[in-house]
Image (tube, rainbow, N blue to C red):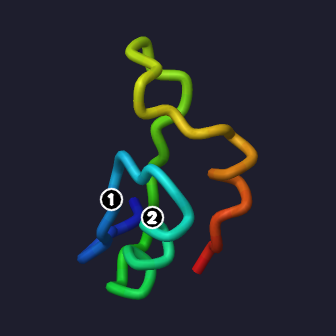
């Protein structure tokens, strides 16, 4: 069994600038709003894909 300690995931990231800020603050994982039923806050999958990975 793998032990996971002190990982931080931030969900609902809406743009690259926000993703950069969250990464700078030490988050391990990002979650993007893609194809939600409301559609209001969705970002294009290419924008999510182009965000920096740590």
> Looking at the rendering, in which quadrant would you find the C terminus?
bottom right
Residue 10: which disc?
A: 1
Quarter assignment of residue 49: bottom right
Left or right of residue 48: residue 22: left
Give the crowd class for mark 1: few <14, some 14-19, many >=20 residues within 10 Å: some
Above or below for 44 versus 21: above
Lower position in the chain sequence, tag 2 or tag 1: 1
Quarter holding residue 51? bottom right
| Number of marks drawn | 2
Residue 6, percent from left and from top: 24, 76
Q: Are marks 2 and 1 in contact (CB under 8 Å)?
A: yes
Vertical position of residue 46 compared to residue 2: above or below: above
Question: Closer to the camera, 49 or 1?
Answer: 49
Q: Looking at this view, is 18 or 30 the one in front?
A: 18
Residue at 63% over, 51% down: 48
Please tell me the numbered disc located at residue 29. 2
SS assignment at label 2: strand
Secondary structure under the numbered disc 1 in the rendered image: strand
Residue 3 lies left or right of residue 52; in this view the side is left
Q: Residue at x 50, y 70 (%)?
A: 17
Residue drawn at the location 64% of the way across and 73% of the way down: 52
Q: Is residue 40 above or below residue 53?
A: above
Residue 38 is tagged as none
**Residue, x 43% and y 12% (percent of image)?**
37
Quarter of the rendering occupied by the N terminus: bottom left
Q: Where, by quadrant of the figure, is residue 27 drawn?
A: bottom left
Residue 8: x, y in percent?
A: 30, 69
Please provide percent x and percent y for residue 28.
Answer: 42, 73
For the view shown, which residue lies furthest in the top direction?
Answer: 37
Q: Position of residue 11 (x, y in %)?
A: 35, 50
Does 46 sit above or below residue 37?
Answer: below
Given the current orientation, which residue lies at the most extreme left position?
6
């Amino acid at each position: 069994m793998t032990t996971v300690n002190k990982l931080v995931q931030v969900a609902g990231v809406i743009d690259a600038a926000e993703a950069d800020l969250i990464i700078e603050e030490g988050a391990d994982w990002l979650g993007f709003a893609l194809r939600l039923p409301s559609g209001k806050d969705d970002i294009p999958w290419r924008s999510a894909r182009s965000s920096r990975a740590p």
